[in-house]
């Protein structure tokens, strides 16, 4: 529904109706909106071609777009980055995609001002759902007369219902910005097809609606399910067709006798993750989605440029301790990994179905050991995949593990640095230090994997000094080249986090301790011992925007802010020193040893010497070794090849020492270093 509505709006036919409506209403438009309206002929002439280009159906249009005289331009283009710097002279299609994104955002600004104030590309009417403790405002908005976009949404929904004639319709609501659209569609179904059962699930209900009390929500939907959907949905479908009673439902809200009722048949067990099956993309119009570039940063663009198949490596979070996180909820609390073999089965099935081999593993934090096993299984099966995921910046991500992940197709990771202050990281129970984060980021970067950091300001008791010091840490991470992308979030105290459950323990006050009757997750609070966090948001984001584009490192931190801020107490080269001073690898027996290259050819030169001829993707190289040692190296590489079960280092050490002496001599040899540079990993 979302992509179909966007394609209805951003079409020659749709924009014609929008421009005609604006003209008929004789609205007082801003200077920017007036300019867009005056350029309507240009927009109508270009819109269908631009959409086709963003769908990768019209690639040659890129040449016209980058010439600079094809797209009409309004205020969004005033903020455009230096595109020659960002994309060079050969990145024509990427540059064109970025300019086309600005073009769509200009039109979005016009729509928001003149047609629908709730409009947003991914966060429609989000402000109605964020921290909405009561249902009143959302209910009022839903009762307002339909606007043009509401009518179009309803028309699309009506087409679907007439085509499929469903008995029930479910809405997945992952974020606040999806709630209004789902309820608006549900409203249409209730008014026009009252025999259809309507239900809702997803991330928003799972976090926000756990204490739901307002029965008016059920004027729009019949049921709301929480947490993992497989078991509740199966029971709900059985109930809808009359096979089971209402009391047998699982984790389901409904209205009975005018009140909200919670039904949870705990005797029915959830489906183990290994048995949930492979996501089915068969009916998704994957060729119609738009690939846009909102920020000219290689890492930042991954969220919107291209289409990624979604999978999870594990249910829940293996760490599960961060005090700002909803660790009391099932989707984080219950950790259940899947085997690498099952994951690769699902990867192969999705590639066969979609024809696309890009994967985003959407874990809370992907487990390093499972990432290792997955990478090896990808190599064993000879799969060609491109993937990225979310991680914790923990020391398990050694330089060699990152090289393995890169070899399997990993191109990027995102992780929570949160607050770049060791005191606050300890308070958060993040389990890492800033120095450790710098070293891990360096491991990923050196292996060719991009790194995005989630950053946080405003954590309870955070001082102005700590905020500025965090910014300096971030500046140095970017300047040293070990971090490529980031985003500052303002701390939000949520009802299901350790901070929200025990605010006194973190020296903050919950301003509304009694939950509302609708959504209860983000809690308004006071932080009397911390800084005035409102003073820092704009400066933090402005500086980060520059750092992500490789500029502004020399600008004093105080210049990013409108108010006076303290000077940083962080030494100028702190991050670089941490990266340079990382201790060398200690070869412990329990570590695994792995060869990810192809096995060399063994060529006997004479009775005493052999050549091991290695063929890499770019070039060949040879090692001339004494015969018996060369045969031993060949045997070792065969034994530790990625095609074999993982071996512990102890096995190889014992075999070497039984024949040649001190294993440390091998580690310090030129042969070992050459092998390390070409695919020998200690993980």
Image (tube, helix red, strand yellow):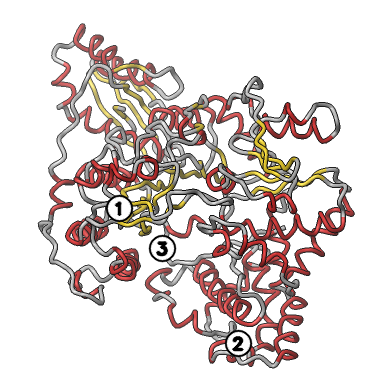
The residue where tag 3 is placed is 297
Determine the residue positioned at 73% across, 28% down: 247
> Is residue 554 visible in the rendered structure shown here?
no
Residue 182: x %, y % from top left? 69, 55
Determine the residue positioned at 73% across, 31% down: 234
The residue where tag 2 is placed is 36
Helix, strand or loop at label 3? It is: loop
- Which of the two marks, 3 or 1, is nearer to us in this view? 1
Helix, strand or loop at label 2? It is: helix
* Dot 2 crowding, Cα within 10 Å, few <14, some 14–19, many 20+: many
Q: With 421 as the anchor, is 76 left or right in this view?
A: right
The image shows residue 634, relative to residue 353, as above or below, that is above
| Quarter of the figure with residue 224 | top right
Q: CA distance from mark 2 to mark 1?
A: 41 Å
Determine the residue positioned at 71% across, 85% down: 19
The image shows residue 193, relative to residue 351, as above or below, that is below
The residue where tag 1 is placed is 459
Q: CA distance from mark 3 to mark 1?
A: 27 Å
- Which of the two marks, 2 or 1, is nearer to us in this view? 1
The image shows residue 346, relative to residue 212, as above or below, that is above
Helix, strand or loop at label 1? It is: loop
């Amino acid at each position: 529904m979302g992509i179909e509505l966007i394609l209805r709006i951003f079409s020659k036919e749709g924009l014609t109706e929008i421009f005609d409506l604006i003209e008929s209403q004789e609205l007082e438009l801003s200077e920017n909106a007036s300019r867009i309206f005056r350029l309507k002929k240009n927009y109508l002439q270009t819109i269908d071609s631009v959409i086709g280009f963003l769908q990768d159906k019209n690639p040659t249009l890129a040449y016209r777009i980058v010439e600079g005289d094809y797209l009409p331009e309004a205020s969004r283009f005033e903020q455009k980055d230096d595109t020659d710097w960002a994309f060079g002279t050969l990145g024509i299609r990427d540059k064109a995609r970025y300019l086309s994104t600005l073009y769509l955002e200009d039109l979005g600004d016009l729509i928001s001002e003149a047609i629908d104030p709730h409009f947003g590309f991914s966060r429609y009417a989000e402000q109605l759902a964020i921290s909405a403790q009561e249902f009143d405002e959302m209910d009022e908005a839903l009762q307002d007369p339909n606007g043009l976009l509401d009518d179009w949404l309803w028309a699309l929904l009506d087409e679907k219902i007439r085509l499929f004639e469903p008995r029930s319709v479910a809405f997945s609501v992952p974020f606040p910005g999806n709630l209004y659209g789902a309820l608006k569609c549900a409203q249409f179904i209730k008014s026009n097809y009252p025999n259809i059962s309507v239900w809702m699930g997803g991330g928003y209900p799972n976090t926000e609606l756990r204490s739901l009390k307002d029965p008016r929500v059920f004027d729009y939907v019949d049921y709301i399910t929480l947490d993992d959907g497989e078991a509740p949905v199966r029971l709900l479908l059985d109930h809808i067709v009359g096979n089971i009673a209402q009391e047998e439902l699982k984790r389901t809200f409904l209205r009975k006798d005018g009140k909200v009722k919670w039904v949870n048949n705990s005797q029915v067990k959830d489906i183990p993750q290994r048995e949930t099956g492979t996501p089915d993309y068969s009916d998704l119009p994957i060729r119609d989605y738009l690939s846009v570039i909102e920020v000219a940063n290689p890492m930042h663009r991954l969220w919107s440029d291209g289409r990624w198949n979604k999978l999870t490596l594990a249910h829940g979070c293996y760490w599960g301790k961060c005090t700002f996180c909803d660790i009391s909820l099932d989707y984080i609390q219950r950790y259940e990994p899947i085997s690498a073999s099952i994951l690769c089965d699902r990867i192969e099935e999705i590639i066969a179905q979609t024809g696309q081999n890009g994967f985003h593993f959407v874990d809370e934090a992907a487990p390093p050991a499972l990432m290792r096993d997955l990478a090896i299984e990808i190599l064993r099966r000879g799969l060609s995949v491109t993937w990225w995921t979310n991680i914790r910046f923990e020391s398990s991500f050694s330089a060699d593990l990152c090289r393995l992940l890169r070899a399997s197709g990993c191109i990027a990771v995102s992780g929570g640095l949160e607050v770049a202050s060791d005191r606050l990281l300890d308070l958060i129970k993040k389990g890492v230090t800033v120095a450790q984060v710098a070293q891990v980021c360096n491991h990923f970067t050196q292996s060719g994997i991009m790194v995005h950091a989630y950053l946080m300001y405003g954590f309870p008791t955070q001082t102005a000094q700590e905020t500025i010091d965090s910014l300096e840490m971030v500046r140095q991470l970017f300047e040293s080249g070990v971090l490529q992308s980031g985003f500052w979030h303002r701390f939000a105290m949520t009802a299901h986090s350790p901070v929200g459950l025990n605010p006194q323990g973190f020296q903050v006050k919950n301003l509304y301790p009694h939950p509302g009757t609708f959504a209860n997750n983000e809690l308004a609070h006071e932080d009397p011992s911390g800084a005035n966090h409102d003073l820092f948001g704009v400066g933090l984001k402005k500086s980060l925007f520059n750092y992500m584009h490789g500029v502004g490192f020399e600008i004093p931190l105080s210049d990013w802010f409108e108010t006076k801020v303290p000077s940083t107490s962080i030494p100028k080269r702190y991050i670089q020193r941490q990266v340079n001073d990382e201790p060398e690898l200690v070869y412990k027996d329990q570590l695994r040893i792995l060869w990810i290259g192809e096995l060399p050819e063994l060529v006997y030169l004479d009775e005493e010497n052999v050549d091991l001829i290695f063929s890499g993707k770019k070039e060949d190289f040879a090692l001339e070794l004494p015969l018996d040692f060369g045969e031993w190296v060949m045997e070792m590489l065969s034994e530790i090849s990625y095609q074999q079960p993982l071996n512990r280092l102890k096995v190889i050490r014992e075999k070497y020492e039984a024949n040649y002496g001190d294993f440390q001599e091998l580690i310090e040899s030129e042969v070992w270093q050459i092998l390390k540079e070409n695919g020998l990993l200690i993980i």
